[in-house]
Structures are given as structure tokens and as C-alpha cells.
Amino acid sequence: MTENNLDKGVDRFYSRFNYKEDTFNSHTESSYNLVDEINALDPKLVIDVGCGGNHLKGKIQNLIGVDAAKYEKADIQATHDELPNIFKDNCADVVLALGSINVGDKPRIYRHLEKVINLCKPGGIIVMRNRLAGEEATVFPEGKKNFKHELGIHWYPWTLDEIHQATETFKTRVEYYKEPVYERAMHKVHWSGLKNKRMLLGVYWWKKL
Ligand SMILES: C[S@@+](CC[C@H](N)C(=O)[O-])C[C@H]1O[C@@H](n2cnc3c(N)ncnc32)[C@H](O)[C@@H]1O
């Protein structure tokens, strides 16, 4: 699948299944709990890439929300690959990527991680949330309702090991500010056959070197 088709798939998927506030709020480590902690850093610019419904807008100071899909409340509609056309490198004190680097294969995932790192100032903070694969997790299993084929996107099989590997890969540019912790969140996608399950995610903070 081409990159362009994957981006269209993301737009199609999330435009149809907008990530709503109740789901956002169900994240135990990466929802409104971030507000006080990030405001305490007194950031002049916070960029929320893949902001969904932009629920942190007006709560975290100086925040701009960008998303590939059509969300009325996003400030800018753009993909991660378009970020360099919009923002200068090293411009943000804080970058949030809460569940938005989950789609595609390794080269795409690593390219998007790099885009996020580029946006952040040295000394700044990057907060990441990845949806984890594996037995415990409810990442859509291969073949489930032909999900992958039907909606034109596939999920990256993140694990905590993969998160450590990504951190190692970028070790000249970032280090853990907070090591990964598991997080649970509500999963309300009825058509997936996974109703009432809870997603398993990893949340970690990087400091840009
Ligand atoms: C799981 S939702 C989370 C939304 C929001 N961050 C939250 O926590 O409520 C992931 C979001 O990332 C966006 N996204 C995924 N891939 C993207 C990309 N390549 N560029 C921009 N946004 C992307 C999706 O459109 C979706 O709104």
C-alpha cells in the first residue's frame, strides 16, 4: 500500500470513527492528567500531532492541534509528513503524539517519530502514546472482519520492546524523561467485534537532547 493511500486510509477511518472525548478521557496516563504537568513547564508552544477532537485545547496553554482527519475542532488538518511545511524545526517546547504514530510499517513509523523529534526544541518534551499489540491487547487481529483490507490501514505492532528499540535508535536525539508505563483505555468499536474490551497502550515521555 502506498503512503498516500495510507494517509487517505487514516483520514477515512478517523473521519468516520472520530476519537471522542469519552474515549480520550478513559486513558489513564495520557488524557487530562497531562494538563497540570505540562502547564507547569510554562510552554510557549505545544503542538499536538494527531490531536483528534483537540480536547487539550484551551486547557494546556499555547497548544495547536493538528490532525490528518476531518475533526471540526482541530486547528490544522495535515498529516505528519506535512508538518515541516507548517512548523519550523525546533519550534515547540512540547510535542504530543497521543496515539497518532500507530499506522503503517516500520519505515513509516520511524519517519513519523523523526518528524516529531524535529519539531521539538532541545530540552523540550515529547509525550508519546502507542497502542500495543500482543496477546493482552485488543489491536485488531489479522483477518478480524477483514478490517485491514476494508478500511485501508494497518496497525503497527508496537510492544514495550519496540518502544525501547525506537528510543535506542534515536539515542543521539532523545532520552527517556519518563520510561514507558502501561495504560488502559476504553475500546468502543462495536463493528470490530471487540466491544467491551480495553485497549492496552504504552505511554512514555522523551526529552529532546
Ligand atoms: C487514537 S486517535 C487519538 C486522538 C487524540 N490524540 C486523543 O488522544 O484523543 C489518533 C489520531 O491520530 C491521527 N493520525 C493518525 N495518523 C496520522 C498522521 N499520519 N498524520 C496526522 N494525524 C494522524 C488520527 O486521525 C487520529 O485522530
Image (cartoon, rainbow, N blue to C red):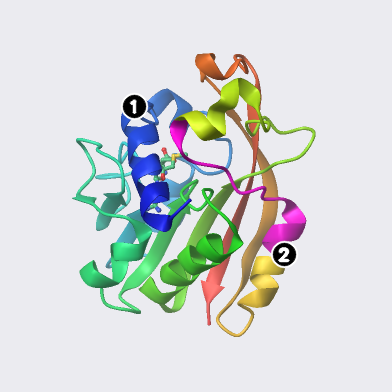
Asked whether the beta carbons under mark 1 and mark 2 sit within 8 Å of each other, the answer is no
Tell us which disc is closer to us: 1 or 2. Answer: 1
Answer left or right for 58 relative to 208: left
CA neighbours of label 1 inside 10 A, class few (<14), some (14 to 19), many (20+): few
Query: Residue 179, percent across and down?
Result: 68, 60
CA neighbours of label 2 inside 10 A, class few (<14), some (14 to 19), many (20+): few
**Which range of residues does the magenta coloring cover?**
151-164
Residue 15, by quadrant, is: top left
Foreground of the two, 27 or 5: 5
Amino acid type shown at disc 2: His
Q: What residue would you read off at disc 2?
A: 164
113 up-or-down from 28: above or below = below
Q: Which mark is residue 16?
A: 1
Indicate yes or no whether the magenta region holds residue 100.
no
Query: Residue 51, percent across and down?
Result: 35, 46
Q: Is mark 2 within 8 Å of ligand 1?
A: no
Query: Residue 62, percent across and down?
Result: 25, 58
Q: Label 2, secondary structure: give it.
A: helix
Residue at figure coordinates x 40%, y 62% from the top left: 95
Q: Label 1, secondary structure: give it.
A: helix
Indicate yes or no whether the magenta region holds residue 155.
yes
Residue 182, by quadrant, is: top right
Considering only order in the chain, which callout, 2 or 1, is on the residue closer to the N terminus?
Answer: 1
Answer left or right for 172 relative to 69: right
Q: Which mark is residue 79?
A: none
Residue 69, by quadrant, is: top left
Query: Residue 23, percent across and down?
Result: 47, 27
Asked whether residue 175 is in view, the answer is yes
User: Ligand 1, what quadrant?
Assistant: top left
List the single residue furthest toward the bottom.
172
